[in-house]
Amino acid sequence: MLQEYIQYADLIGWVANCFILFGMYNIGKKKLSGFYFNIIAHIIWLFQSILLAMSSLFVIDILLIIMNIMGIKSWRKK
């Protein structure tokens, strides 16, 4: 049973990694959509942290979601 969870967690992690790469690329191109890609990635990692019972991953992803929301607000003001 645990092995199944680990396999799913690895797949979930790779999906989140793809979103974070798209997010960073778009932020590098000064596109607001990059923040949204990052938020999606961190939400996916939240599910992964729950699946693996990793409180440290959960907390950092909550904080990074908040920081991305702050980035969206900051960029919209400009």
Image (tube, grey):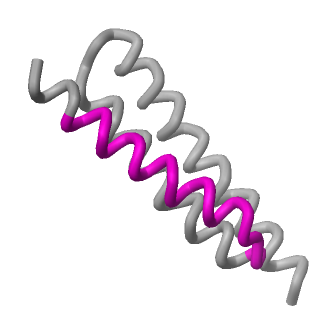
Along the line of sight, the residue nearer the viewer: 74 or 10: 74
Q: Residue 66: where, in percent of width, then height?
A: 39, 51
**In this picture, residue 54 sits left or right of residue 2:** left
User: Is 54 colored magenta in this rendering?
Assistant: yes
Instruction: Please tell me in which quadrant of the rendered image residue 68 appears.
Output: top left
Q: Residue 7: where, in percent of width, then height?
A: 79, 67
**In this picture, residue 73 sits left or right of residue 56:** left
Instruction: Please tell me in which quadrant of the rendered image residue 38 appears.
Output: top left
What stretch of residues is rendered in magenta?
Answer: 52-73
**How many labels, in total?**
0
Along the line of sight, the residue nearer the viewer: 38 or 71: 71
Q: Residue 16: where, in percent of width, then height?
A: 56, 48
Compared with 12, 67 (above or below) is above
Q: Outermost residue toward the left?
A: 77
At horizontal 34% and vertical 35% (from top left) the residue drawn is 35
The quadrant of the image that shows the N terminus is bottom right
Question: Chief secondary structure of the magenta span?
Answer: helix
Along the line of sight, the residue nearer the viewer: 56 or 10: 56
At horizontal 41% and vertical 42% (from top left) the residue drawn is 67
Compared with 38, 47 (above or below) is below
Along the line of sight, the residue nearer the viewer: 13 or 36: 36
Instruction: Please tell me in which quadrant of the rendered image residue 48 appears.
Output: bottom right
At horizontal 57% and vertical 49% (from top left) the residue drawn is 15
User: Is 5 colored magenta in this rendering?
Assistant: no
Q: Outermost residue toward the top?
A: 29
The quadrant of the image that shows the C terminus is top left
